Image (cartoon, coloured by chain):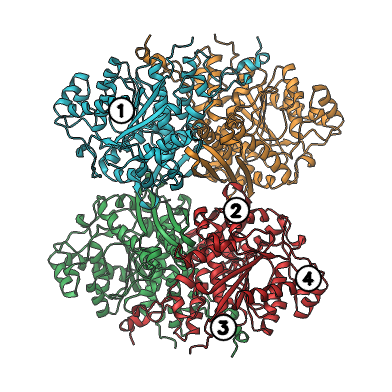
Chain colours: A orange, B cyan, C green, D red
Amino acid sequence: MKREIQKPEGKLGILTPGMGAVATTLMAGVIASRKGLAQPIGSLSQMGTIRLGKRTEKRNPLIKDFVPLASLDDIVFGGWDLFTDNAYETAMKAGVLDKHQIEEIKDELINIKPMKAVYDHKHLVNLTPNNIKEGATKMDLAKQLMEDIENFKKANNCSRIVVLWCGSTEVYTKASAVHQSLKSLEEGLKNNDAEIPPSMIYAYAAVKLGYPYINGAPNLSCDVPAIVELAHETNTPIFGKDFKSGQTLMKTILAPGLRARLIGLDGWFSTNILGNRDGEVLDDPGSFRTKEVSKSGVLDDILEPQLHPELYANTYHKIRIEYYPPRGDFKESWDNLDIFGWMGYKMQIKINFSCRDSILAAPLALDLAIFMDLAKRAGLRGIQEWLSFYCKSPQTAQGLPAQNDLFKQLEKFENTLRFLEGEDLITHLGLDYYENELLA
Amino acid sequence: MKREIQKPEGKLGILTPGMGAVATTLMAGVIASRKGLAQPIGSLSQMGTIRLGKRTEKRNPLIKDFVPLASLDDIVFGGWDLFTDNAYETAMKAGVLDKHQIEEIKDELINIKPMKAVYDHKHLVNLTPNNIKEGATKMDLAKQLMEDIENFKKANNCSRIVVLWCGSTEVYTKASAVHQSLKSLEEGLKNNDAEIPPSMIYAYAAVKLGYPYINGAPNLSCDVPAIVELAHETNTPIFGKDFKSGQTLMKTILAPGLRARLIGLDGWFSTNILGNRDGEVLDDPGSFRTKEVSKSGVLDDILEPQLHPELYANTYHKIRIEYYPPRGDFKESWDNLDIFGWMGYKMQIKINFSCRDSILAAPLALDLAIFMDLAKRAGLRGIQEWLSFYCKSPQTAQGLPAQNDLFKQLEKFENTLRFLEGEDLITHLGLDYYENELLA
Amino acid sequence: MKREIQKPEGKLGILTPGMGAVATTLMAGVIASRKGLAQPIGSLSQMGTIRLGKRTEKRNPLIKDFVPLASLDDIVFGGWDLFTDNAYETAMKAGVLDKHQIEEIKDELINIKPMKAVYDHKHLVNLTPNNIKEGATKMDLAKQLMEDIENFKKANNCSRIVVLWCGSTEVYTKASAVHQSLKSLEEGLKNNDAEIPPSMIYAYAAVKLGYPYINGAPNLSCDVPAIVELAHETNTPIFGKDFKSGQTLMKTILAPGLRARLIGLDGWFSTNILGNRDGEVLDDPGSFRTKEVSKSGVLDDILEPQLHPELYANTYHKIRIEYYPPRGDFKESWDNLDIFGWMGYKMQIKINFSCRDSILAAPLALDLAIFMDLAKRAGLRGIQEWLSFYCKSPQTAQGLPAQNDLFKQLEKFENTLRFLEGEDLITHLGLDYYENELLA
Amino acid sequence: MKREIQKPEGKLGILTPGMGAVATTLMAGVIASRKGLAQPIGSLSQMGTIRLGKRTEKRNPLIKDFVPLASLDDIVFGGWDLFTDNAYETAMKAGVLDKHQIEEIKDELINIKPMKAVYDHKHLVNLTPNNIKEGATKMDLAKQLMEDIENFKKANNCSRIVVLWCGSTEVYTKASAVHQSLKSLEEGLKNNDAEIPPSMIYAYAAVKLGYPYINGAPNLSCDVPAIVELAHETNTPIFGKDFKSGQTLMKTILAPGLRARLIGLDGWFSTNILGNRDGEVLDDPGSFRTKEVSKSGVLDDILEPQLHPELYANTYHKIRIEYYPPRGDFKESWDNLDIFGWMGYKMQIKINFSCRDSILAAPLALDLAIFMDLAKRAGLRGIQEWLSFYCKSPQTAQGLPAQNDLFKQLEKFENTLRFLEGEDLITHLGLDYYENELLA
């Protein structure tokens, strides 16, 4: 049965805390696509199709023709950043996009100027910002953010807002008492509790106003009981965390393949070399730890060593990220897998992935914003696990194990869309093509 | 609703036309596993688990405890080969297994002696056999095979038989008139029609007797209307073709990942270096052509260029197999992928896969034999598309496009088992964990 | 004792038969360097230094300050091509250089227009030219070329000329009777002997006029007794063949390393993927054969299997070149080496080299032209083996084995320059630093 | 003029402080070679040839037939270790050699029992030894070592001794005042100066007795003025340090190739994964620092950024060593090179080297012992720079820059042998083959 979904009328404001390489690549790509200068490749919301019904029916509409999504033409960008550079300046410095391509949309980019950001040296150590808010308490800062959002919404005549964290990875923090309830969090904000990182202040501000919040980095942000509680109270979708863009994307493609075939795994060594601001931040051990935890979890969920101890209980998994300036944003990952098969015989897989961090992340950022807006209009609130497909470390209901297998995530995503529109779910059973083959 | 399935009582004979590296590695592994000297790693029938019900139920039985499968203890091996070497001699020469490990099970292997094989120089050119059948017509040869099978069954006190082609890749042949009906095929066998390759004579013999037939090589064998017709007539499961073991396995893991993310593909270059008998045979352009066709098809089905021409219509796909003696069975594949993402920016993936051909193929061979025996006992006949998971080029109903995506294949396989046992199919929708999140 | 060398006064004309990617990249780079827009990286004649005397003397002048070389400012380019595109058009199509960089020197490039080329379908099959000479006999064509050269020299006010083959690889030809003496060659030219390829007609024309001739491709051109004889007669330096740019460069770096350490070699598999005109031409088996022979020889000379049969007598060496359009000029080579060490234990080396064909070849082309002009002025004639450093398949005196080890080639090159200028040759003995260490 | 060299009469004792994987692989290989069970591949002293005279003379004797070397039959092994395992036990645990191969020479190996070793926790932190000497002062320990050596020599009827450090990498130490003169060192030994690491105590003991000492690890050992002074006093050859076996070998092969061609280098990232005791020790930051310094230096010497700042002044060089147990001794290095050529265009080289640490090191250890014994008999004392070929960080005369280019090192080595035997040095000039080509 089809679900009631509000139409995407009016403008959608996408506000990014953090206007660095990923955010400006997102902005540039959307603007260029609008002008017919580029294609939003990698975005399911823009270019994806979805199979409906049986294989032989050949019904494969575009996703955007199947569910009611905001149009690129209706998107307005804004954001906050620790530095005063506008989107044009940042894009030029980031070294992601061809300079000639940036020049073509200079007029639009130059007008996207960062609002002053919330900053806390305790949570981010390797940078020296020049564009930050002052406030007596964290609650005070949250209120400033809420004002920023409402001012932006009004100034740009938006009907809806989505807030999307594109900032740096904060220092590793574990959820503690202050994060356990909305009450304790609000008290913590008033008391300047040190355990509340800037990203969580943004999450609070957005969700308090009822605007979907997404966390594209691995730090603790909306994935604490307090924000979940608030999301239920204000009927707001939240989700995260950490865009699944490069090496982890590859890992959640390959690991399900090994698992499908029950190929044993002695070890998986992953290293990355990159030279952008992300690499600089991750050179700090605290920030690296946050990233490492986010990246490490995926194997266990996929391989299920508890079910297959003879194959996966002794898997040695090591991840390194190395700051290496010659590469800039054009990072490279090297993976070495020591696997074993039939009778224990050893084999190896080695992968070089020359990828561009921001190029891979931008379409994920766009899709998350677009689908979170859909979720809001479809009356979904709280954790949107069906968007796990986009995240390294998907948020789930308390106690529910995450699914990191990219292909289960894709099926979850597609079947959710089918469910929303009242179409049959797909199971790939397909015995109906072979009725003649089943004896009574 | 649970389906009626006969119990796997008595012995199961597995007969392999072709007793080379793959077949003897299969045999050695099963024997060693029976003795506790090794583990049948990679075999879903022996070590696989299957999730039942919701994630939170934590029901994950072994597949062999979920559906009634033949036990390794009840398997008896036999086969035919172009050369007189017994399984011990072949295993020693093949260079796949450690010689000390082969010695431990010498007694069993030495007794597996090849029956005389059907040979036709037109269909296999690079070898000089010394152990072949004589016969006035191909039908005559088929009858000899049927006698071989029935003699073996009786001599070994088997209750069931499966025939599993593990022979070399034959020269490329297209299906023609003689293959279109059982009648024309039987006439062709009597008239020595040149278009009927040896492997098809084995297929005919097995299926005529009602024994499941599987084709592990890429040549035309049971995938013609005539054999499908016979399979329906004798209520026999058939399936193929071409064990999906190395580079193509990797391709059907990675390509679904690219497709899931709508990452564009300019080109995919794949080369293999290997030095075993397989490599020698594939040095013949005719045999290589057969393999190339089998390997090439997988991308199109997965990427669906007709739905995404801007991403996949111009994909340049090139496959090479190079005979390179230093490597023996320990082959290596190198894949280079030229991909593009957001706004068309180019990236690259390069993969080195050092694998062992026969180590990867043996568990597939075992599973196919075991599950085809299950199919027979479950009253399934004709094409067993649910076993696509195991093949590079899965056989399907007339006009039905194959599914080569490993993960869709796995789901098809698992949901078929769930269906047979009357369990709920899994869709990964999972909204029931979040009932609270859906507003009215 | 220092050798008498004429000063490089006046202009030097560099004429290239073949004005494709390599030639135009050479031209663009020289022009851009002259204007300070780029650096001629990779060119020893422009940026190289040479150590003189003892390590502790720290005398390391630029090579161009040590021996009298033509200045970039004095170089004038011209050439012949099978197609009418001028250097600007070709550079834009070749996809080697950034289009914005080409635009900066458009004025100069657009004026370098190809003269009509000599063509023979028998020797080059995959192209369809539109700018070719007509002539009753090959001698007639040679005379037209000589006129072209002299006209160019006069028109451009050059004092010296060098002719540098930058054309495609011709179909494989072995030296035969017609190539054995100047007399037979000249008769062959008059009789249109089919065994005389176009490149040899250029060689004849240049050397007949006394202008140095270099062959940058692997075909038979100046490396036949007839041209050597002519070179002696006209006191002209000649040399070739085949610019040592990418994979073979790497091979002649690595193989000496293995040989130095006596590391055994079971096999070396090399494949290349490229999508430029070169790749297209080499898709023809005849042209590929020419290239294969040129590339294959290097290992034997370096490894000397006759001296170390236990290490190198059974080395399996296989080379593949694959036309793969997605890559254009930005080719990639993959090398797999199966090596063995102490007690026979096996190891592996695998190399991915993402290189740009023309970027690697251009500085070699420039240096060869510059140093051949030096040779002429220094009174050297015939084969210039001291320039082996630059070629995949260096021409040597009759019966003398070539040296392909890049490091011996470099030492030969440097010691020749030292010899010309009367400096001590360097042996790396260095015991003079340790006089105190030698007991009587 | 040929130099006087004493004949290698009687037995040569090779004593290794450190009887781990490298030392036992060395011992096993020598013993197996003596019995004809294996070949000492990689050893120039055993299998190397040397070219004498002109290329056309074809004089290429075995090195061991050209200079008088100790025979493998005359070698006796002994050593010290922190653990009590004999050479058989260690070899079995090390996982380098095939267990069946070790069993064949068990009798010899089992009798090579480690003497108690000198240990100092300050200099080596990740191990817990069980076989160590007690002594009031470091001088006292040195005397015990001297007794050990003389006892071994007598017991085994040796005429000569060489001491070869094969122990672990000690914590990074810089040379300080105590190392500056023999007098201060001897006082330090008596006063238990903390700056004197165990390896230096071995060096002192050996050189004091006049026995050649070699340092196969990167720590400070014989490369201090005090030991050089002692070496001159006792007419003893010394040399080190750090066997150039795996990734650095590769680096000193490739970097000279880039330098030869003046290919620019933006960055070189090197990582290693290994799981042997070496990897465990290097997981300690202090020991890693020692290794890092040893490995880092090679690029600067080879590339000479001071001569070519535009190519090499901004090279970013980063080295990582990662403990990764699945690999054991079968380590893997991954190198990523970001290079640039003509006009600044960027290219990449990526190398996977699957090597076996001890297999690569063993022949170097053997050669160093054999050639140091030659040096002693030839009347060479102090630093033996001509053996730079074997070391990552070659010791040189005060103020003399090292040569790390493998090919210059090889030439230095070969020309030294030619010098010792009075043969012409080779310069690769080779103009004498072309007398006819030089005009007057």
Q: Are marks 4 and 1 in contact (CB under 8 Å)?
A: no
Could you tell me if residue D113 is visible in this image?
A: yes
- Label 3 to label 2: alpha-carbon separation: 37 Å
Location of the C terminus of chain B by quadrant is top right
Tag of residue D138: 4
Left or right of D386 in this view: B283:
left
- Label 4 to label 1: alpha-carbon separation: 79 Å
Could you tell me if residue D251 is visible in this image?
A: no
| Mark 4 surroundings within 10 Å by alpha-carbon count, few (fewer than 14), some (14 through 19), many (20 or more) | many
Tag of residue B152: 1
Q: In terms of secondary structure, where does tag 1 sit?
A: helix
- Label 2 to label 4: alpha-carbon separation: 31 Å
Identify the amino acid type marked 1.
Phe
**Same-chain status of marks 2 and 4:** yes
Which residue is the site of mark 2? Answer: D93
Which residue is the site of mark 3? Answer: D377
Percent from the top left, x then y, of residue A331?
57, 46
Q: In terms of secondary structure, where does tag 2 sit?
A: helix
Up/down of B72 relative to C132, above or below = above
Percent from the top left, x then y, of residue B53?
58, 17
**Same-chain status of marks 2 and 1:** no
- Front-most of residues D275 and C26: D275
Chain under numbered label 1: B
